[in-house]
Amino acid sequence: MISVEPVARPGAPLARRNPVAKLAAALVFSLVLIATLDPVAPAIAIAIELVVLPLFGVRYRMLARRAWPLLASAGGILVTLVLFAADRSGRVLVEAGPILVTEGVLLTALGLVLRMLAVALPGILVFATTDPTDLADALIQNAKAPARFAIGALAAFRLVPLLEQEWRMISMARRARGVDAGRNPVAKVRLFVSTAFALLVGAIRRGTRLAVAMDARGFDAGIPRTVARRQRFTRADGLLVAGAAVLAGAALAVSVALGTFRPLIG
Amino acid sequence: MSGVVLRGFGWRHAGRKGWAVRGVDLRVERGERVLLLGASGAGKSTLLAALAGLLPEDSGEQEGTVEIDGLDPRKARERVGIVFQDPETQLVMARCGDDVAFGLENRGVPAEEIWPRVDAALRRVGFPYHRDRPTAALSGGEQQRLALAGALAPRPGLLLLDEPTANLDPAGAALVRQAVADALDADTTLILVEHRVAEALPLVDRVVVLEAGGGVRADGPPDTVFSAHGDALAAAGVWVPGRTVSPRHATAPPGDRLLTADRLGLPPRLAPVDLEVRAGEALAVLGPNGAGKSTLALLLGGLLRPGAGTATATAALAGQDAGTPPHRWRAPLLARRIGSVFQDPEHQFVTGTVYDELALGPRRTGEPEAAVRATVDDLLDRLRLARLAGANPYTLSGGEARRLSVATALATAPRLLICDEPTFGQDRRTWSELVDLFAELRDAGHGIVAVTHDPDFVAALADRTLTLDRGGRP
């Protein structure tokens, strides 16, 4: 199953914050980090992220489970960059046949990979600690997002786990019809494309039916909506966003002070 | 409480040649309970959509007028609630209470009134859980009761039910009907579309029958309508109460063993099952939702790898491949030996026309084109699909799609046919055709396994039954 449920302890002090505040804090924190190419600022940022993790009610083991595809791809990117980077300046660290690893190469690659992790973690944290319904509510009430968009996306999101089940059914139904690819890679690709198409057709039909049902229940009929679940943006939520900005700024400041800061532009 | 007046009403969907519904003159007084009947394609669902204000002016052409309390239905939306057939696509929110609240929010009900009204609506339909329950954790019958609560919470004067129990097992369907009976008050006008007339009759005091070619064929109290038009309605596919179908049991003893299941299971979906499938015999697999019947059908069909035990084909079914379990056969070989008919016909459609759909299997198994054409033409005739040969399978009606999905499984002439709920939601005519077809196949020496909730189907066809309980054990 594709999991779309939050996995954190809901009572944790920062997990309880307004979803829009969490999203804004994550965005501020990530955006500041994008400004530099050095490995120091992102490394500090990752350290900060790992320290605040328990405040969001997320266990380290859970994070490792959720983030392992990210870690695996980070490893892959590191190896690729080290082996194929064009800039081979700096002290030579390893030289084995065609493989030449220099200090400059390693620093650049490390900077990129750490930056990727530092930017991705806050996003993972937000979605691991936020109920999708609460997020949609807060987007409408605190960020003035149109209900048509937020509730529509939420309703569509609820159908996502069905897709995996649907894919299995379509694949089995095709086998029952005498359609399989055997060992032929071309046939495999064609079967994949045609199964994906059937999945898409089914998803559109289901989406249409859902839209009609929402229509029938008066959704987006021009009457001003009321809200059953109130989301409040409090002073604590403002502090969370400000705190994220201050901590990200501090990471940059340390990097500047150590002289490792390399701005993205210029 | 709302009244409905239709005068010469007709609707043609944009891009279609024929009228979906036409020439309907009908007056429903406030508080009346009406069962709307008609053969497949008579326009019942279109009529309900029109009453619910769900036919935008630019989506087709209208004839005559339709009014709710003197208003255009598109402007009287807040007076109407509707429940559709498919539970999965009418629940919007992730939690039950939020879903009922959704309609109230949309109608601008003040926030402090919302939760008391949600709780009241849930009580009205006898909903057994707290409002925080995830909607995904509900059974089909519970989801439909929740949808009913969502439709009732805004206190509509007119409640429309479009086959709300067609996708449910008998126990779930009974609970939904009970909920409708309990929840209706004297202030609510009801218009119900339902194939299963006998079960729906206690809910209504008037029956209206739409004529397939247009207009209203019959209108009045149920007894009067059925005594005057019973035969014609039954012939048109309506499940008229008290008319049974003559059973078609096997006249000869069963033949060769085709497939044996030995402690076959897939924990936790299906606990181990022992069974034998024979040629010339129809075996019905029964049991409540969640007992693993569909899983058993997929295992017997060679479509899933068993988690426990084995499914073994005999030489009579698989020749020299009898030693290999069916789930490891190549698909073309499987299709020639075991045909599977899925619960949702649309899962099985692969091509763009009915003709190609039927030709696909024989072509994959290497038949020459002339033989393919002969097979396809024969099936088109037998299953009344000839006039649809060029149509896209996804545009067929429910009954047509079901007949096509059975025909596709037959196209490769498998000795064993495995069907998951083949009669689900079918009108009486398609239902009888399916019973006759399966009986003919069985009498010609095919083995039939049908997973089903349909007691009439079991009574009419099954030579033997196997009942799974919720633990999956027979």
Image (spheres, rainbow, N blue to C red):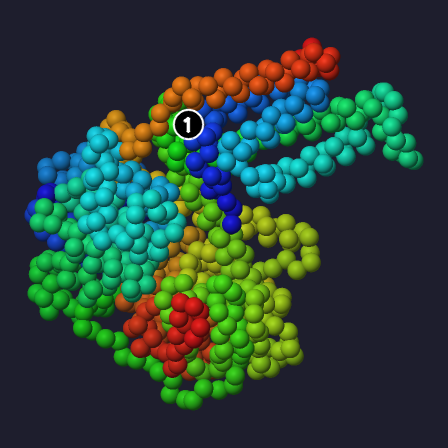
Whole-percent x, y for residue B295 in the image? 48, 65
How many numbered marks, from 0 up?
1
Residue at 40% of width from left, 46% of height from top? A206
Quarter of the image for the C terminus of chain A: give it. top right
Residue B203 vs B73, above or below: the answer is below
Query: Of all residues shown, which one is farthest toward the right?
Result: A97
Residue topped by disc 1:
A18
Toward the viewer: B312 or B14?
A: B312
Toward the viewer: B249 or B13?
A: B249
In the visual, does B170 lie left or right of A119? left
Give SS at disc 1: loop
Crowd class of label 1 (few under 14; some 14 to 19; many from 20; radius 10 Å):
many
In the visual, does B141 lie left or right of A240? left
- Could one spot residue B341 in this view of the protein? no
- Could one spot residue B35 in this view of the protein? yes
The picture quadrant where one finds residue A236 is: top left
Residue at 10% of width from left, 58% of height from top? B205
Whole-percent x, y for residue B158 in the image? 15, 45
Whole-percent x, y for residue B367 in the image? 59, 68
Three-letter amino acid code of the residue under disc 1: Asn
Residue B63 vs B45, above or below: the answer is above
Residue B439 vs B401, above or below: the answer is below
The picture quadrant where one finds residue B74 is: top left
Residue at 54% of width from left, 33% of height from top? A54
Judging from the image, mark 1 belongs to the subunit labelled A
Whole-percent x, y for residue A142 in the image? 37, 23
In the visual, does A97 lie left or right of B452? right
Residue A164 vs A119, above or below: the answer is below
Residue at 51% of width from left, 31% of height from top? A55
In the visual, does A67 lie left or right of B377? right
